[in-house]
Amino acid sequence: MNRTETIEAVRVDGRGVWIDGRPRTLLCASLFYFRLPREQWRERLEQVRASGYTCVDVYLPWNFHESAPGRWSFEGRRDVAAFLDLAHEAGLYVIARPGPYICSEWDGGALPAWLDLDAELRVRQNEPRYLERVAAWFDQVLPLLAERQYPENGPVVMVQLENELDFFDCTDRAGYVSALRDAALGHGITVPLIACSGQGDLAGATGDVDGVVPACNFYPDDDSPDIEAEVRRYAALVAERGVPLLITETNRRHRTLRRLLASGAKLIAPYLQSSGWNFGYTPSTGNWGRPGNFMSHGYDFGGYVTSTGARRPEYAEAQVLARVLDTWGAQLALAEAVLPDDRPECDFPTSSVSAALAFSGGGRLVAVPHLGAEPGTAVVGNVPVAVAPGSCPLMAMDVPLGAWGIDATLTLASADLVAATDGVLVFSSDVPVTVVLDGTRAEIPVSERVPVAEVTVVVLPSAEAARLRSVDADGTVRMGDAPRPPAESAPTTVREVRRRFDAAPEEPAGRHTLAPTLESLGVYRGRGAYRTTTDLTGVDELLLTGAADIVDLSVGGRTHPPIAGFGAARRIDVGDVTGSVAIEAVVEIWGHANFDDARLPALRMGALRGLGTLWKVRGTSDVSALWTVHGHWAGNPSPTRVLGGWSSTRVAEPVTYSRTVHSPTPSALHLRGVVEPLKVSVDGGAPETVHTENPWVLLPAGTHQVAVTLPHHPSGPDLRAELLTLEAVRGWSCAAQNDELLAGFAARTGPAESVRLPLTLKPGEETWLDIDLTPSPEGYLVRLDATQVRVTGWASGECVGRVWVGDRPAFCGGDPDTLWIPPGWPGLTLLARGVEGRDAPGIRTLWLEAPT
């Protein structure tokens, strides 16, 4: 097929999205094959299609398919070609999103962990070393997409390049996006290429590159009155570029989706309508503005399908909106977003700007969002109408009905039109509906059928409208089957398990002067052990810098609480040990950062994992005094003040403090009381930003001139400085336990004994537990009644997730306290590790629940 023919099959222009020469309004649900068991792909795809959505968007994670350099897999749960073929069979279109960076709260945003072992490689840049690696990924994945483009052999109607590049400091956006575009075209991609902006910077996301369509991601407060005003602005901006408003990610609530539709969106893709699961060591870390968040294995933001496949009430809302789109069809797909002259008057909270869609054949749909919690009334076209709380009906005004063989004009209908045939109009509403038809006005109660101006008007409650299948010419409404409520079952309590005696194997990874990164040891997912013996005579404190993600540290046989500081310096009290002592650290990768957060070292994009550097603190001195002041009106000779002690009326303007510090060994400058970010320069070098999350600066041995620049903040806390003289702990023996090694061990059987719970563990102690599961067609959710343990679970040869009970960092994304055993995945093996904390570690019992 040549390019011209394909463009006619799928194209976008200033009027909308065209498929097979017909305009379409696309409802698109995120659905990710890599977060689902392969056995459930078909069921989940058919579930999306049954919701009325016509499209799915799917990321393709690079590091899911290249698990180690040059080791590719597109088989089993990685068989993306089979997934796309199933989507095609289900009658769904697909927007494919191969990255190379995808975000998606996925390990490293899908960028392989080993990329940054090359110090000269710069990710997400127009840089040869990086683009060479990207080319290898695109050589694998783009042919699969090209072979499955619509309409020839598959469902792919758009391909997204990169993801939310406007969040990232890319130095040559045009060059980088051009390189990705050229690679896509070179591999035969002929459907529209798109690039989404995450915070509204269209040029930042696309580089304004020719042939790449800008799209927008919106995540507003669902109750905000200003959604329409923001969306209309972006609809106007993309219209200047001759393309429609494509919303590639947004919230999941259908009231919000209706507001986006009425504001001009032609593609609406709520992110994550169909939820999933982060199997293995694949969650990311450091999400959504809170440095150090851990992403849970359950990947669920409240979409219309849960992580285990159950429908939520929002699913019915999807079916109703889909009926509205089907009923209005092409005239809705080509409708122009306008500001109504006669803004509805509402006695409830509503949007600050009205939104409506004008039909080319006359009439319009007016969105009336009810943002409150109580029943309300709106005056639309001088007619008072009831509006249900939490709803956003799309009210028809002055619409000719000739398209359905009805010789009349629908002056007003206060509810969603979900079906129309010759002489019959069907509306969906949970409050009485006002209809004005050729001057005849009627109020139709819910679940009633009333003749109005020789037209039969039927009002279905929304729950029934969701099941609407067809309407006969005589007004008979045919419904689909009502969804069956989930079967109720009591949780099963597990009291007896088999406890193994053998420990998990580890692969020796050599001796190293300083602790290396796990990635340099070949551990891209999993964990590693670091061991050494050192003399702590006269040492009361250790300083750990650059550690990530989870460090379980034992010094002289004493375990310490887990450290999860993502590179922030941590002081460790070791005053109770002395002499030659053994130190052991087990470091687990929860996941590489998926977002470039400069506040903590290990949350930078591409940051590596491992123990970092462990230092003995040989001395501490207060260096808060004797700083000279530069800035504001300070003259020469420079005044001498304590750090932060300059008095000035120039609030918020920067002032610089400098002084000389000396240490015969490496040292660490600790700035206590940091509130606002400040700049630190050493010996006139490039300034380093210091944040409250990590107020430390490492210095090499010697004498240094340190300059601290901060905004003048007379109401701020006192700023103090101390200098720690350091000596690195050396001579590390390392061992690797990557995820494959652990999964292989979990699948084997070994010496074991039956034990009854509860089970008590010591801090730092590990044990393997095997649990027999009776096969269940729904699978199981596993919950723990436990204290101070981290548990990793395996089933069917694959890691199903991890749960941390007790003192732990913040989690986000889904339920962090459950493991899901999918249907048909046999067996359950747990690795439980006791961790130091307020309570004694132990597992009291386990529960097996049916997913809901």
Image (cartoon, helix red, strand yellow):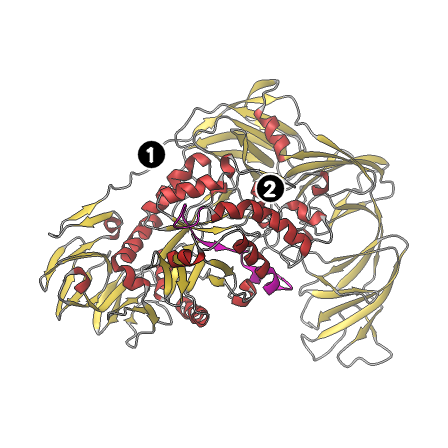
Residue 644 seen from this side: yes
Left or right: where does residue 637 sit relative to residue 255? right
Q: Position of residue 210 (x, y in %)?
A: 52, 65
Q: What residue occupies the far left of the structure in this picture?
A: 454
> Quadrant of the rendered structure where residue 349 is?
bottom left
Look at the picture and state if 637 lies above or below 196: below
What amino acid type should be assigned to the residue bearing mark 2?
Answer: Glu
Look at the picture and state if 518 lies above or below 244: above
- Other-residue count near label 2 (Cα within 10 Å), few / some / many at <14 / 14–19 / ≥20: some
User: Which range of residues does the magenta coloring cover?
Assistant: 148-177
- Nearest the eye: 729 or 516: 516
| Residue at which label 2 appears | 66
Look at the picture and state if 674 lies above or below 520: below
Name the residue located 60 percent from the left edge and 36 percent from the top edge.
790
Q: Is residue 230 magenta?
A: no
Disc on res. 487: 1
Q: Position of residue 242 (x, y in %)?
A: 43, 69
Q: Secondary structure at mark 1?
A: loop
Disc on res. 353: none
Q: Position of residue 23 (x, y in %)?
A: 33, 60
Q: Secondary structure at mark 2?
A: strand
- Nearest the eye: 125 or 50: 125
Q: What residue occupies the far front of the structure in this picture?
A: 2
Left or right: where does residue 565 sit relative to residue 185? right
Name the residue located 40 percent from the left edge and 41 percent from the top edge.
86
Question: Which of the marked residues, 2 or 1, is nearer the chain's N terminus?
Answer: 2
